Amino acid sequence: MTTSTKALRLVALLLLLAGVLLLQRPLFSQTTTAAPTRFSFVIEGVAPGKGTSVLLIPGLASSRDVYAAEAMLLTANYRLHLVQIAGFAGEPAGPNATGPILAPVVEQLHQYIAANHLQPIPVIAHSMGGLLALMLAQAHPEDVSKLLIIDTLPFYGLVFNPAATVENIAPQAKIMHDQFIAMPSDQFAASQPLFTSRLVISPEGAKAVSASSIASDRTVFANAMLEDLGTDLRPQLASIKTPMTLLYPYEAAEGSPTDVAALYTNAYAAKPNLQIIRIDDSRHFIMYDQPAAFDKAVQTFLKP
């Protein structure tokens, strides 16, 4: 994988986007009445006490509806708590408009899980959502029974360089942040097809990804991206004992399967209780590009 390809893939990975799929909701569907301020929840599936609760977290600038197709396959047997971060995909920015985002979101996730007696809950999380899930499992291990992480690295700077550190990529991260803030809205919207082409193969998925990105609050988007690039969880991985399954995508155009696998296995070398699964013929949004393989992985993960 060339340096330019890695840089483009980093930009793509940072634009962790998804849009609204217009799928019919199950009969039991509600928005929580005591929604936290850093995100909202929609609860779908079986009534309380009738099935296992599952927490689903989307990525940067993503709607909860990135999981809509999978949710339709799960709601008969599970009670789904679907997150949407404030400021992403049309959600009002709220307190995420200023100051830190990731750590406060993690603390409110903990409060939500504890207040609703969901401990410990299985968590499914995509990209930056996976980073949040790892942070939650590290800070509050009692909250999470197991993790299904979809194409997340514990430090995204590794896409630039295997020897990258938070400090040496900070100048590039700040430039990217400032460019996203300053970019005129029409120029930003026009740029989305290029980015989404590197995130998702599915034409329908690409449209959804672009729509979600354009609908996001640009400041929240850029600030969360900067925090993501400034977070390196590798030193904490050894202490995160929670069982974890990692799904990662592979396309022949991305390079040799050995090189791509090494990016993930090296990044998570210190993580105990880890299973890594490659999903072929997919880009970052595995749930759009390989829905059958994604569902198989989810159903296997959720089995007792």
Image (spheres, helix red, strand yellow):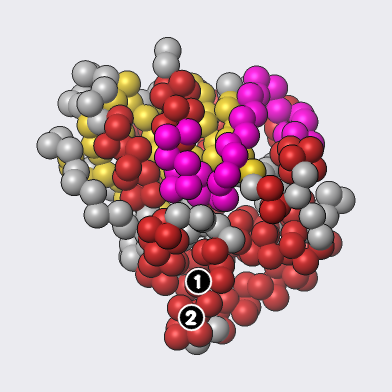
Tell me residue 192's x, y (percent). Answer: 50, 72
| Circle 2: residue type | Ala
* Mark 1 residue type: Pro
In this picture, is 42 found above or below 187? above
Residue neighbourhood size for the residue with mark 2, other residues' Cα within 10 Å, grouped as few (<14), some (14–19), many (≥20): few
Q: Does 197 appear in magenta?
A: no
Extreme residue in the left direction? 27
Which quadrant of the structure image shows residue 227?
Answer: bottom right
Numbered label attached to residue 144 = none
Q: Residue drawn at (74%, 62%), measured in percent from left and top?
A: 5
Q: Position of residue 90 (x, y in %)?
A: 34, 65
Q: CA distance from mark 2 to mark 1?
A: 7 Å
Residue at figure coordinates x 45%, y 83% from the top left: 185
Say which residue label 2 marks: 190
Per the rendered image, the range of residues in magenta is 265-293
View extreme (top): residue: 304
In this view, the residue in front, 101 or 194, is 194
Q: How many marks?
A: 2
Q: Is residue 290 magenta?
A: yes
**What is the secondary structure assignment of the residue under circle 1?**
helix
Q: In the structure shown, which secondary structural element does the residue marked by tag 2 occupy?
A: helix
Q: Quick one: quadrant of the N terminus? A: bottom right
> In which image quadrant can residue 37 be found?
bottom left
Position of 104 with respect to 253 (left or right) is: left
- Pinpoint residue 285: horizontal percent, then vertical percent: 50, 49
Q: Residue 2 location, x and y as percent? A: 81, 60
Indicate whether 26 appears above or below 49: below
Q: Report the quarter where the C terminus lies.
A: top left
Instruction: State whether residue 177 is above or below residue 182.
Output: above
Q: Which residue is mark 1?
A: 193
